[in-house]
Amino acid sequence: METVKTQDVTVNDLPWKIAYIPERCTMCGSCVATCTFNAIEATMERRSITVSTASFPEPTQRHIATPIIKQKGSIINACVGCGMCEKICPNQAIRPTRNQDSRFNLLARSSGSPIKRGGRTNLNKDRTLDKIVIGRISQMTDPSLDSERHTFDVRAPFGRVLLPRELPFAIENGELQMADKVPPVHWIYPIIFSDMSIGALSTRAWEAIAIATAYLNEKYNMPVRMCSGEGGMPVKLMESDFLKYMIMQVASGHFGWNRIIKAIPKMKVDPAGILIKIGQGAKPGDGGLLPAAKVAEHIQAIRGVPKADLLSPPNHQGLYSIEESVQKMHMSFNAAFNFRVPVAIKCAASATSVSVYNNLLRDPYKICGGFFLDGIQGGTGAANEVSLDHTGHPVVSKVRECYLAAVKQGRQGQIPLWAGSGVGLTGNVAADAMKIICLGANGVFIGKILIQLCGCIGNEAGRCNACNTGFCPTGICTQDPRLVKRLDVDRAAQNIVNYMLAVDSEMRKIMAPIGNSALPVGRSDALVTMDKDMADKLSIQYSC
Amino acid sequence: MCRIGAIKSKEAFHPSQALYLMLPQQEGHDNSGFAMVMQDLYGVFGEYKDKPLMSLVCTTKGLKKVDDYMETHNFVAVQEWAPKVNPQPGLDIQAMPHYVFRNYDYPCSYQNASQEDKEALLLDTRLNLRSMLEKDGEGYVFSFWPDVLTLKEIGDPRDIATYFGLWEDSGEMMAKNVVVQCRQNTNYEIVRYAAHPFFIQGYTLCANGENTFYTKNKEYQKTLSRGYIGFESDSQCFLYTLHYALRELKWPIKYYKHVITPLPFEEVEKRPDKAVLTAIRQSFGHLEINGPNTIIGMLPDGSMITCCDSKKLRPVVVGGDETTIAISSEVCGLNTILPNRNREQDMYPNEREIVVITPELEVQRWKQ
């Protein structure tokens, strides 16, 4: 007998344990083949069994070696609970179960490095939006509209809006004429497909979202825009008409911009916009991270980099103040497209968000075409877990504060507010979007739900969250060509399209009862909450 | 729901006409008040057209405060008229002690001031008086403007008319334009300021409906002008937007409709003036109205306008003859005061129209 080595890692130390029923298993090997994390293996187990083969009891004991599927007791090969084994097993013989006694957080730092993972915060699941309802329903004072028969303008501005008195109008023969240039503003669908890069996503997953975007525009006249994420775009797309549906992102790593700039002379149409990413709600101040495992050859080509960990710095090098940001970055990107393309900025929600927004609102060049606020419930392809779970700021009250700061100055709507992080976390994008819009946002951006529609099985209860590993079991967040093949691009795009069509109907289903045919931006009187503190914080009605 | 109306005539008429316009529509309102704005005055006010006329109801204490304020600020009263009231038992009216309609001369220092400065002074004076009287509920200043008279009262319009002797045409209170409404604001608190029509610097407006973008409108308007105050009714927002677009920005009237009920994006896209219309929509996003509404407005030059919400959820009809044209929520009002007009020429403006009746009584229909 050996003394037990208590410090050895065993299956019971891991966050997920495999529940395996050997009696149901035919040892087909599908589960082992499908597990991208190499968390299970086929092995032999010595068994001592009692058998009786006669027609009357004649028990004998035998020692046999029997093949089984076994979970590895290893941190590197820890099961992430993705459930692909269960999905593939023809006999329901295997499935992951959550282990409440996991010691993973204590053991996974054994290399001296922080724990890294993808996904979203798993600690801050409490949702403000679920405690708000749309409570101002048109009854006898005014009629509700008919969501099926009336027309609705479900559109949001992307671009810098001028005050009425700043409009360069001349009056000629009783007609207003535009006497000077105004900043470009595009009226788009109030839900933007958020910035997930090629690199973080597999090219095929990225393509699925791009296909869905184009389809929604071309077939359903829904002007949904997709943001590229930091990491460049396929040259063919940049040279195609479909570029007009894309918002191109630049972040602190400037990945992919070399190719973008080279492609500018060949662009037939302008992109929908430029989004400068300053920070990301899921990992504020931590910079971007694309592990070398995901930097495949085509990613190296698109980004113009060698195979290595790609770290976007936490700040834009060379910029030390917001004034510089406005003058250098905004100006240069505006100039790159001859002031025809709106340039917006994305920041992680923070205690300082209102200050940033105020500065942008007061910028004399009127150059910022949108303020994207990304909260703590946002997602990411890879980050340090300490950032994911312990840094960040809820987005809802922050959007409200920014809006009310603008109201105080009579500048609401001048720089459109876009909010993201956890929009659609419970699967209901329309309701989440409409509530944030009533609080003052012009629109929202969604990310995680898009990949969930593609097939991602990750959640904020710690399931999978392995976007950083290159082993994404659904082929969405990996560059491994064998895994990418698991993703049916057409079905993924179709899921997104169908979901958005449903969302569009649901948006009307909310606008109609409150008697609005245009988006109720800032219509806080339409909201009620049963939480008094929330009512006070958001300046909305308290009801009980 | 409110019922609203307006009469514009080449000949001065008595406010009893306004009552006859409104009373047949009483099934649609609750007879909870009476309010009207008269412009282009005759009778006792006819000779004082250029002298700002204060329309004031107040307590004795309030009147003293107003007198002191006006004296301190060097306004000189040149004429005063008060209606002869007929208090009778059983009248449904919440009358106040004093109803004062008084013309003032501008302070000496303003005799040579620009029109703009004079108009700013009148606005400031009204706002100051309002704030002074509001604290202790000592009175209400509805308008302070040349050639404009406002009366607002709480109660049954018929009883209010009896109280003020509005049924009899004495020739004292005459005007060529009247905008009228027979209901207090019953959505919110009953206060005199909440009754339509509302007035600011020559612009008068009343509305029938519910502005579901009230909060947005209000939050935006508060910073646009010091005169945009009160907001006791969601319909005040329509007036302030009208004032802002026409007076502050000096835009042609037809653009008012583009501000409050912009065209759907798909239609704007096909228009030659899409750059202008899009710019208006985005810059005025917070002044757009939603919900069911009809608006009747009166401009400083005496023009009258009417338009509806973008879904045409509230009614309005315009009709008249060569001398008089009236706007009314319901046609029964027109039938009462203008029974002999050619009814085939009555107009029911649609959701894309703004109808303008010029001072010459020409009716223009601007299609959005």
Image (cartoon, coloured by chain):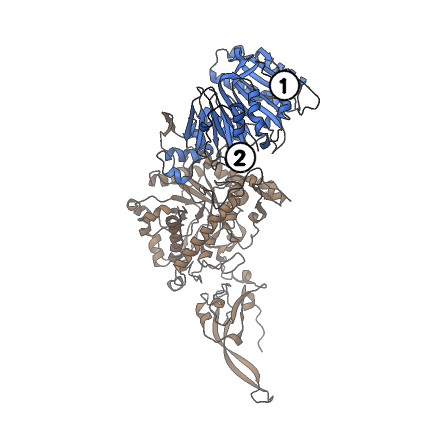
For the residues labelled 2 and 1, the Cα–Cα distance comes to 32 Å
The amino acid type of the residue labelled 2 equals: Asn
- Establish if A465 lies above or below B219: below
Q: Nearer the viewer, residue B256 or A147?
A: A147
Relative to A284, is A244 on the left or the right? left
Q: Is residue A387 visible?
A: yes
Read off the residue under disc 2: B211
Give the chain coloured brown: A
x and y, in percent, of residue B141 in the image = 59, 21
Give the chain coloured blue: B
Closer to the observer: label 2 or label 1? 1
Residue at left offset 50%, top offset 11%: B111
For the residues labelled 2 and 1, say whether their Cβ atoms are less than 8 Å apart. Answer: no
Residue at left offset 48%, top offset 57%: A116
Q: Is residue B220 visible?
A: no
- Establish if B41 lies above or below A341: above
x and y, in percent, of residue A504 in the image = 46, 48
Q: Nearer the viewer, residue A374 or A495?
A: A495
The amino acid type of the residue labelled 1 equals: Phe
Q: Nearer the viewer, residue A211 or A25?
A: A211
Secondary structure at badge 2 equals loop
Read off the residue under disc 1: B164
x and y, in percent, of residue B220 in the image = 51, 32
- Which one is earlier in the sequence, the residue at label 2 or at label 1? 1
Badge 2 crowding class, 10 Å Cα cut-off, few under 14, some 14 to 19, many 20 or more, is: many
Dot 2 and dot 1 within a common chain:
yes
Badge 1 crowding class, 10 Å Cα cut-off, few under 14, some 14 to 19, many 20 or more, is: some
Relative to A60, is A222 on the left or the right? left
The disc at residue A221 is none
Mark 1, chain letter?
B
